Image: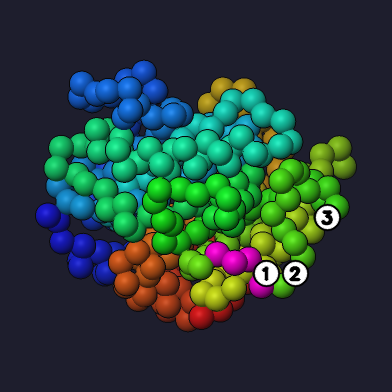
């Protein structure tokens, strides 16, 4: 089994010490002869270390009308630090209601223990007792909704929760169903550590014709207000709602992702930052190594961009 101790000296904002492999998995395919039970409920993009070892895992939910492939560079950065990242494609078209996405995320979570191992490289094992849930944009809402849902149970317990510029609708009073935000401070009963990452430009309109991509009243600030300790909160000052995506997102949707939101000058700094704080957070709460997270909090770790907000509740 690979030792993870040396990763404590690795810059979390850069590629880590592990070589990685990125696998596209369709429900109809698998690496070995497998039964119906191990076929995934949805198509998956799986990033993992390629060398032998047992690694914690992150289930990462994509944003509204985005493809999981748009997160390939982010996934590889996180995986290179010794984590397995499972990114499902929940839908290609969707209306305002996220109920089916929440159910699909629960179904994928329940599938992991019986199916994931069939799709990993030889001698790579997922430690599903250390499983985090995270999502971007509407995927952040979906992640919080599942973590908060006391009726829709999963066979695996999440150990940590991450919201990457999460949004709960178009505006306060215009939440998409089912609403997540209650507007009661520290009301989220999650029983796990939480990290919320926000974009400083998400609340800004790109032009008068388009609404902001992360409107005030339903965005990262509101999500963090409802989090109980332990929780941490970062806001990137001059970057937008989609700036953590790949440098080159192809196709009509990929090209559109450059046009809808107020963006920073380039995607690389925001993507490296988001990947880095995810790694630091997962190291802290899935491995018990808080050194990177505390170094970022205390300003001892140089970040790829300027931060507007850093707040911890411990």
In the rendered image, residue 165, in percent from the top left (x then y), is placed at: 62, 54
Residue beneath the point at 55% across and 76% down: 229
Q: Foreground residue, 88 or 240?
A: 88
Q: What's the coloring here?
A: rainbow
As helix, strand or loop, the secondary structure at mark 3 comes to: loop
Q: Foreground residue, 125 or 151?
A: 151
For residue 212, side relative to residue 140 (left or right): right
Q: Residues within 10 Å of mark 3 (few under 14, many from 20)?
A: some
Tag on residue 172?
3
Q: Are marks 1 and 2 in contact (CB under 8 Å)?
A: yes
Q: Mark 1, mark 3: which one is toward the viewer?
A: 1
Q: Which residues are magenta?
A: 186-190
Using the rendered image of the protein, determine whether residue 79 is visible from the camera's viewpoint. no
242 up-or-down from 255: above or below: below
Q: Are marks 3 and 2 in contact (CB under 8 Å)?
A: no
Tag on residue 55?
none
Residue beneath the point at 52% across and 36% down: 104
Mark earlier in primary sequence (1, 3): 3
Residue at mark 3 to residue at mark 2: CA–CA distance: 13 Å
Q: Label 2, on which residue?
A: 184
Q: Are marks 1 and 3 in contact (CB under 8 Å)?
A: no
Using the rendered image of the protein, determine whether residue 124 is visible from the camera's viewpoint. yes
In the rendered image, residue 186, in percent from the top left (x then y), is placed at: 66, 72
For residue 163, side relative to residue 43 (left or right): right
Residue at mark 1 to residue at mark 2: CA–CA distance: 6 Å
Tag on residue 187?
1
């Amino acid at each position: 089994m690979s030792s993870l101790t040396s990763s404590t000296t690795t810059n979390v904002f850069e590629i880590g010490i592990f070589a990685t492999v990125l696998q596209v998995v369709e429900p109809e395919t698998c690496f070995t002869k497998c039964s119906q039970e191990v076929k995934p409920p949805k198509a998956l993009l799986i990033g993992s270390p390629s060398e032998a070892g047992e690694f914690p895992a992150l289930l990462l939910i994509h944003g509204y009308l985005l493809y999981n492939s748009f997160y390939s560079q982010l996934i590889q950065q996180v995986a290179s630090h010794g984590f397995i990242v499972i990114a499902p494609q929940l839908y290609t078209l969707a209306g305002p209601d996220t109920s089916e996405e929440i159910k699909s995320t629960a179904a994928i979570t329940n599938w992991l223990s019986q199916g994931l191992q069939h799709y990993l490289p030889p001698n790579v094992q997922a430690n599903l007792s250390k499983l985090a849930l995270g999502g971007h944009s509407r995927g952040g809402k979906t992640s919080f909704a599942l973590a908060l849902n006391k009726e829709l149970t999963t066979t695996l317990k999440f150990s940590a929760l991450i919201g990457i510029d999460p949004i709960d609708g178009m505006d306060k009073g215009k939440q998409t169903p089912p609403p997540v935000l209650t507007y009661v401070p520290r009301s989220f009963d999650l029983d796990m550590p939480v990290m919320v990452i926000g974009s400083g430009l998400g609340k800004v309109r790109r032009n008068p014709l388009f609404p902001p991509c992360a409107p005030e009243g339903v965005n990262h600030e509101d999500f963090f207000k409802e989090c109980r300790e332990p929780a941490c909160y970062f806001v990137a000052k001059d970057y937008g709602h989609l700036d953590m995506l790949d440098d080159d997102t192809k196709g009509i949707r990929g090209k559109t992702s450059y046009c809808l939101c107020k963006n920073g000058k380039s995607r690389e700094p925001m993507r490296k930052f988001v990947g880095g704080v995810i790694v630091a957070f997962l190291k802290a709460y899935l491995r018990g190594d808080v050194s990177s997270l505390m170094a970022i909090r205390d300003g001892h770790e140089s970040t790829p961009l300027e931060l507007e907000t850093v707040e911890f509740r411990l």
